[in-house]
């Protein structure tokens, strides 16, 4: 898919090259008209400049047909300019949409340009303003009828791209068709099913009721509160310390059973695990720890209980307590 896009982009006309061509054609037309008018625009021999007097006969012969020459130049360079501008429109639209839509925009640009060119040609032949307006109006009417449906879908496609009532991967139902949104283009919304792709015109999408399937609701985990009963403030190294407490839901107070509760010693960097246990049917726990120093720098342990959480419950931890660990007394020899 990506390779096809790359190839198409390489074949699309360069915007810069198209801009240079447009400027060149306009400049060439202006210079050509100026030169023609300067050489052949003299109506009488007396008005011809001295350096052109030797060619006065030729000038006077060509002068009555000057308007036709000018009209021919305007038509040729005008058409070349219209082609360059329509190519610019195609190159720009090709960056944001598919080939068929870009080609439609190019055709619309060319038809509109030809209508303007016809009005300009009418003014060159000094047709009155009403006639020139009629030509332009007729051209606009032709363009309007020829492109009414295309423009409707293009404008609707722009609206869908800007407002984004759905995004890629959404499951939607539009005009009785249900599928997964594969792509949103200017002219079409593309839905994908198991065995086919459905192209719905953008104008139809805008005027229809869109049913968008909501993603499945995920159950939120319940908040918990973890209470740790105050342990002894001072213990002897090697003695057994039992930590008790309870884990429950915050909103209802219901016990959280079968959950792992860990007793940790707060430390710089990573906390040390002292012991762990499982909550009982009432949410309570009894976790035993053999007292020992966990930090060589001091003889205290800053302990707290922590529940890591699960699919159904949020994590929580208790308040912190400080336990001083005293050295065990040495036994006296008999």
Image (cartoon, rainbow, N blue to C red):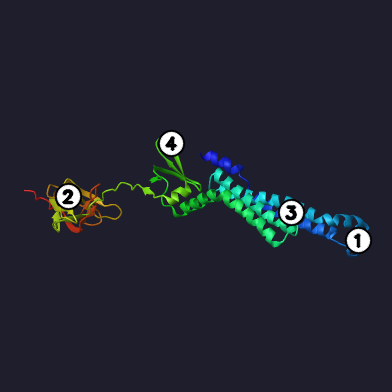
Tags 4 and 3 touching, CB below 8 Å: no
Q: Residue at x 79, y 56 (%)?
A: 67
Disc 3 target residue: 74
Q: Position of residue 186 (x, y in %)?
A: 51, 48
Q: Nearer the viewer, residue 286 or 204?
A: 204
* Count of number-bearing discs: 4
Nearest to N terminus: mark 2 or mark 3: 3
Disc 2 target residue: 256
Q: Answer few, some or many: residues within 10 Å of disc 3's Cα (few below 14, many 20 plus, some between 14 and 19).
A: many
Q: Position of residue 141 (x, y in %)?
A: 60, 53
Q: Position of residue 10 (x, y in %)?
A: 60, 43
Of circles 2 and 3, the one toward us is 3
Nearest to N terminus: mark 4 or mark 3: 3
* Quarter holding residue 177: top left
Task: Determine whether the residue tagged by mark 2 lies in a helix, strand or loop.
Answer: loop
Disc 1 target residue: 51
Q: CA distance from mark 4 to mark 3?
A: 51 Å
Of circles 1 and 2, the one toward us is 1
Q: Answer few, some or many: residues within 10 Å of disc 1's Cα (few below 14, many 20 plus, some between 14 and 19).
A: few
Of circles 2 and 4, the one toward us is 4
Q: Residue at x 44, y 48 (%)?
A: 205
Task: Determine whether the residue tagged by mark 4 lies in a helix, strand or loop.
Answer: loop
């Amino acid at each position: 898919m990506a390779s096809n896009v790359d190839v198409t982009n390489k074949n699309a006309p360069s915007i810069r090259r198209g801009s240079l061509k447009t400027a060149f054609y306009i400049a060439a037309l202006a210079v050509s008209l100026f030169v023609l008018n300067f050489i052949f625009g003299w109506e009488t021999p007396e008005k011809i400049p001295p350096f052109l007097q030797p060619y006065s006969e030729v000038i006077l012969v060509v002068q009555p047909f000057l308007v036709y020459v000018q009209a021919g130049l305007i038509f040729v360079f005008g058409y070349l300019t219209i082609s360059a501008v329509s190519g610019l429109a195609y190159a720009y639209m090709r960056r944001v949409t598919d080939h068929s839509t870009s080609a439609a925009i190019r055709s619309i640009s060319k038809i509109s340009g030809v209508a303007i060119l016809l009005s300009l040609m009418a003014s060159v032949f000094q047709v009155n303003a009403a006639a020139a307006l009629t030509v332009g109006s007729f051209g606009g009417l032709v363009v309007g009828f020829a492109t009414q449906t295309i423009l409707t879908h293009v404008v609707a496609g722009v609206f869908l791209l800007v407002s984004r009532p759905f995004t890629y991967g959404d499951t939607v139902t539009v005009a009785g068709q249900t599928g997964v949104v594969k792509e949103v283009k200017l002219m079409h919304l593309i839905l994908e099913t198991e065995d086919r792709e459905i192209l719905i015109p953008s104008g139809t999408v805008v005027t229809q009721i869109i049913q968008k399937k909501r993603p499945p609701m995920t159950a939120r985990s319940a908040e918990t509160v973890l209470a740790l009963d105050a342990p002894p403030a001072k213990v002897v190294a090697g003695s057994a310390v039992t930590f008790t407490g309870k884990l429950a839901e915050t909103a209802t107070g219901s016990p959280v059973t079968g959950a792992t509760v860990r007793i940790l010693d707060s430390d710089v960097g990573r906390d040390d695990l002292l012991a762990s246990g499982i909550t009982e049917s009432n949410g309570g726990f009894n976790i035993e720890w053999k007292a020992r120093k966990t930090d060589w720098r001091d003889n205290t342990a800053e302990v707290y209980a922590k529940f890591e959480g699960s699919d159904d419950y949020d994590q929580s931890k208790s308040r912190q307590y400080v336990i001083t660990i005293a050295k065990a007394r040495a036994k006296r020899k008999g």
